[in-house]
Image: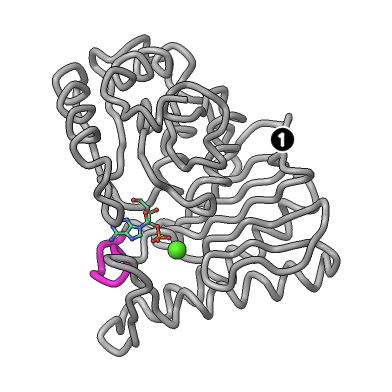
């Protein structure tokens, strides 16, 4: 494992203990709403602080982009951090959330960690060296098409502009697959695609910290990640499809007819 991935693992465990310490006493947390339906608690902030401290100590010159504190520093290396992905689940005591930490070098993903502190599952990837769950090597499924596939997704929760387009995609994919799941943590959804627990995943309007680490996990597990129209700008647009290569193609084809003009580029 790369030294940078090792540091990310250490940081993720520290965040995990901040998160789990408060999981049994959620009623005492102070929660605020950043935007419509977008919540943050002191746990998000404390977990993020713990991650940034650990990274800073090891790599003081690196830049950071983190969900709660934004951008800090300027460097070829940038850490992309979501201290608690699935905050809404967390605040309801619904045990599906994760810590997500990625490192990019000149915009290219190098290291990825997604950590589920409830199940103590540590998903890691180094560019060019594969993806692991704890010590086990990960591989996307060999699902050949939509028939029989289990897909993950996220329902638009903030920006409702694309709701009708999204529902049309959902309708077609529901009809053609074995089932659709909406677990509520995009970082874990990507990790589950990498681990072969989901065959594929799609969502519109994600933030880069929700899936930067997840994208490298899927790629290193042999899968494809793209923009919703099949292009390569997903890290900028936040509209994503992830799956094994064959299924990815079928998902793009089914989704494409429903894309609003401004998303199909
Ligand atoms: P977050 O908890 O880090 O904000 C999936 O829809 C993604 O959107 C999640 O990874 C989640 O990341 C984010 N999100 C923010 N608010 C949400 C909400 N009310 N419902 C679902 N997802 C939300
Ligand atoms: Ca978050």
Which residue is drawn at the image coordinates 43% and 21% (left, top)? 141
The residue pinned by badge 1 equals 127
Q: Which residues are magenta?
A: 88-95
93 magenta-colored: yes
Q: On the rendered structure, is 156 left or right of 247?
A: left
Q: Quadrant of the N terminus?
A: top right
- The quadrant where residue 86 appears: bottom left
Q: Quadrant of ligand 2?
A: bottom left
Estimate the x, y position of residue 8 in percent, counting from the top left.
67, 58
Which residue is drawn at the image coordinates 44% and 78% (left, top)? 43
Badge 1: residue crowd in 10 Å (few <14, some 14–19, many ≥20): some
Q: On the rendered structure, is 109 left or right of 147?
A: right
Q: Nearer the viewer, residue 155 or 262?
A: 262
- The quadrant where residue 252 appears: top left
Estimate the x, y position of residue 76 in percent, counting from the top left.
82, 51
97 magenta-colored: no
Is 123 rendered above or below residue 85? above
The answer as to whether callout 1 falls within 8 Å of ligand 1 is no
Q: Nearer the viewer, residue 112 or 25?
A: 112
């Amino acid at each position: 494992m790369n030294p940078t991935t090792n540091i990310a693992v250490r940081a993720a465990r520290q965040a995990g203990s901040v998160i789990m310490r408060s999981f049994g006493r959620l009623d005492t947390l102070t929660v605020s709403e950043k935007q419509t339906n977008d919540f943050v608690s002191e746990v998000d902030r404390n977990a993020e602080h713990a991650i940034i401290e650990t990274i800073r100590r090891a790599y003081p010159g690196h830049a950071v982009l983190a969900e709660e504190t934004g951008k800090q520093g300027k460097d070829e290396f940038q850490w992309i951090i979501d201290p608690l992905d699935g905050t809404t689940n967390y605040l309801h005591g619904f045990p599906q959330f994760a810590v997500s930490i990625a490192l990019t070098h000149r915009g290219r993903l190098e290291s990825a960690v997604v950590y589920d502190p409830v199940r103590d599952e540590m998903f890691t990837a180094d560019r060019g060296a594969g993806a692991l769950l704890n010590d086990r090597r990960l591989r996307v499924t060999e699902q050949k098409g939509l028939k029989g596939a289990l897909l993950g997704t996220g329902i638009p929760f903030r920006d409702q502009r694309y709701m009708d387009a999204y529902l049309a995609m959902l309708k077609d994919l529901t009809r053609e697959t074995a089932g659709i799941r909406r677990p509520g943590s995009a970082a874990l959804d990507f990790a589950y695609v990498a681990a072969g627990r989901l065959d594929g995943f799609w969502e519109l309007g994600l933030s880069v910290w929700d899936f930067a680490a997840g994208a490298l996990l899927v790629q290193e597990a042999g899968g494809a990640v793209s923009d919703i129209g099949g292009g390569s700008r997903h890290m900028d647009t936040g509209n994503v499809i992830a799956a094994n290569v064959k299924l990815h193609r079928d998902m793009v084809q089914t989704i494409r007819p429903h894309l609003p003009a401004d998303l199909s580029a």
